[in-house]
Amino acid sequence: MSHPSNVKGRASSNGAVSNAKRRAFLKGAGAITLAFSWSVPATLAQQPAARARLPGGLDNNRMLDGWLRINENGTVTVYTGKIELGQGILTALAQIASDELDVAYERIEMVSADTSRSPDEGMTAGSLSVENSGTALRFACAEARSLLLGAAAKKLGSAPESLRVADGVVSSETAKLTYWEIARDANFKREATGKVQPKPSSQLKVVGLSVPRRDIPGKMTGKASYVQDMRLPNMVFGRVVRPPSHGAQLVSCAEAAVRAMPGVVAVVCDGNFLAVAATREEQAIAAARSLRESAQWRAGPALPPSGAALFEHLQKVRSVDTVVNEKASTSAAGGQVTTVEATYTRPFQAHASMAPSCAVAQMSDGKLTVWTHSQGVFPMRQDLARVVRMPESAITAIHVEGAGCYGHNGADDVACDAALLSRATGGKPVKLQWSREDEFAWEPYGSPMVMKMKARVDESGSIVYWQHDVWSHPHSTRPGSESGSNLLGGWYIAEPVKAVTPVNSPQPSGAADRNAVPLYDFPSQKIVLHYLPDMPIRTSALRTLGAYANVYALESFMDELAAQAGADPVEFRLKHMKDERARAVIEAAASKAGWQPDRNAGARARELQRKGESSKGRGIAFAKYKNLAAYVAVVADVTIERRTGKIRVERVVAAVDAGRIINPDGVTNQIEGGIIQSTSWTLKEAVRFDRQQVTTRSWADYPILTFQEVPAVEVVLLNRPDERSLGTGEGSQGPTVAAIANAVANATGARLRDLPFTPDRVKQAMA
């Protein structure tokens, strides 16, 4: 368990265990529209080239009735393939639907990520939910409103443009009708056209307000909110037993003896996959312990070296090298040019979710139902079907929140474990809970990375050449490939399903190279990715993918170059930035923080170091996430205890341009959470291992930021209601690490280039 003073993992998930409630609602609501369908009419399916591309998530889920339905009881049910994981997305999407339909926000019921009911929108990842699902709902609801007004116009004998709508009541000069009365005449069982334009910003009433989050009350009052809280009739409890190391092979285990233990319902020994189920949870824990102690294993292959040797190793192993961006100036730099080089590193890092991963599964009558906190129920179901060797149509995957995760932790893997175990429980649902040790040792980690930077600066202090080389393992081994399976349990069963070797996502989004291409305007630049496809330790999506480390390197190097040029870091950035929205957030963050050029930082730091006194520093950094999403600039203030080497981040100011802001409080929450998470990554977090196994197994092995260490955070929002909404969930992590790094250099005169910034590293740098 976590230490009581810790911010326990990632407090990120929402929501009630409400599937039964939702089904009861649908039975009682008397839905007017026909049952929705994701099938495409045959005539359209035969002519894919003739189909126009639709906005956002509509393009792959084209049936209008798959996004919303009007209910006789005066409510609207809105469907989304995106999930709530603590980012407030269901609140924001309900706001969008409310405005476009002219229906009170309280009338909107949200249904998300259920393979039997919702659109397939892939993963909830990449800060894309508002951009994709929000855009789809804007156009779907605008078109639905148009159809409803058309039906009302016929009944009222009025022109549609003469009608007024308020909270679902359509009025002409002489009469009124409600949506609930005319919905039968507005057939939503049709393909969306994407041609009905949503409302302009001037007509939005709910979008732009800090509407209270829908998921918070249940969490604050102790309501059963997470999959870990689920209880189903006749449910049994499961545990999985992992090998002692990655790739180890089972020789023998005391299966019969474990079956005879009190309460044991099932024992599964399928190849190298071991699991138990019991009537009570403590019985399952005891049985798993006994099975683990009796099991004999043959050791797997050796792991890579740890510590500083890891980063040398990354630069020597097999890589797939790609120039992801390159441009050359047509004119040579004049005068003297100074070349500057630096190398930065990031270790393996864990998701450190608040609660270990959990899933509930039930196999009955040839059908499998899985309740899961997977961020992609459709891709997970696809891979799961291959592991359990069932058709996808026989599997239903329903999202229920898990207590904390951003990125690909153990959620998909534990769903597979529960499904494999459910085949042996005689139709009883089984809740399989990973232990904390399971979570730390077996989740996919954020990849270690090496970033080598090189630049040339001319006599005027201008950067005339920029080079960024990055070495990294994959940053997404999620389920969802066309073949094979990326579910852990599927690799260990007697008839394993082969893992899929991932490819790096292309620019401009990127993955390992995310945000490696600078937004600054340099006349010549070259960005090279050295992609390491072989994974002796599994890596996958940790929040921001490669952007956290790439922005750390890029923005730290900008400060180093500013120092080389004798320039103020803010002025130096603005000198090289043409994007006006980027300039605006840099200026806003600097203004809010009270930034003043500091020409004597180096001398002051050296004097404080000589006296052995604590010192304060300030740093700034900027990024536009993926060069596609929100613009974020961060200023960090730090204090360095020179005797201990401890860094205290005192205050962080962030300025954000996310285009049209749906829910200001929601955006602020996302930025604040990213800053706190990044501060923890930056100061403390690294997964440890030896040549045989991961040795990080508990909170004692993986310290994270405590409540007392959380900085004061201020967020400035630059709302642009006439621009499209930009994703914010992963916008602040990269600028935060770099701002802290730059503040430490400002305070001490020493540059830290290896994460995390532990006290020992600080003292070593100052020495």
Image (cartoon, rainbow, N blue to C red):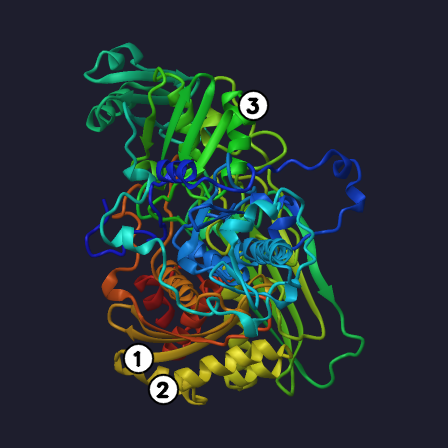
Residue at point 62%, 68% (across, down): 162
Write down the quadrant of residue 646 in the picture: bottom left
Residue 388's disc is: none
Which badge, 3 or 1, is on the more N-terminal residue? Answer: 3
Which badge, 1 or 2, is on the more N-terminal residue? Answer: 2
Position of 700 with respect to 107 (left or right) is left
- According to the image, label 3 marks what residue? 391
Q: Residues within 10 Å of mark 3 (few under 14, many from 20)?
A: few
| Distance Cα–Cα, label 3 vs label 1 | 63 Å
Kind of element beneath mark 2: helix
Which badge, 3 or 2, is on the more N-terminal residue? Answer: 3
Residue at point 76%, 74% (across, down): 329
Position of 329 with respect to 20 (left or right) is right
Front position among marks 3 and 1: 3
Kind of element beneath mark 1: strand
- According to the image, label 2 marks what residue? 604
Residue at point 30%, 29% (across, down): 232
Q: What percent of the width, then of the height, locates residue 468?
A: 61, 63
Q: Residues within 10 Å of mark 1 (few under 14, many from 20)?
A: many
Instruction: Give the quarter of the figure containing the C terminus.
Output: bottom left
- According to the image, label 1 marks what residue? 615
The reply to whether callout 1 and callout 2 are in contact (CB within 8 Å) is yes
Q: Nearer the viewer, residue 527 or 673?
A: 673
Q: Nearer the viewer, residue 566 or 263?
A: 263
Position of 652 with respect to 508 (left or right) is left
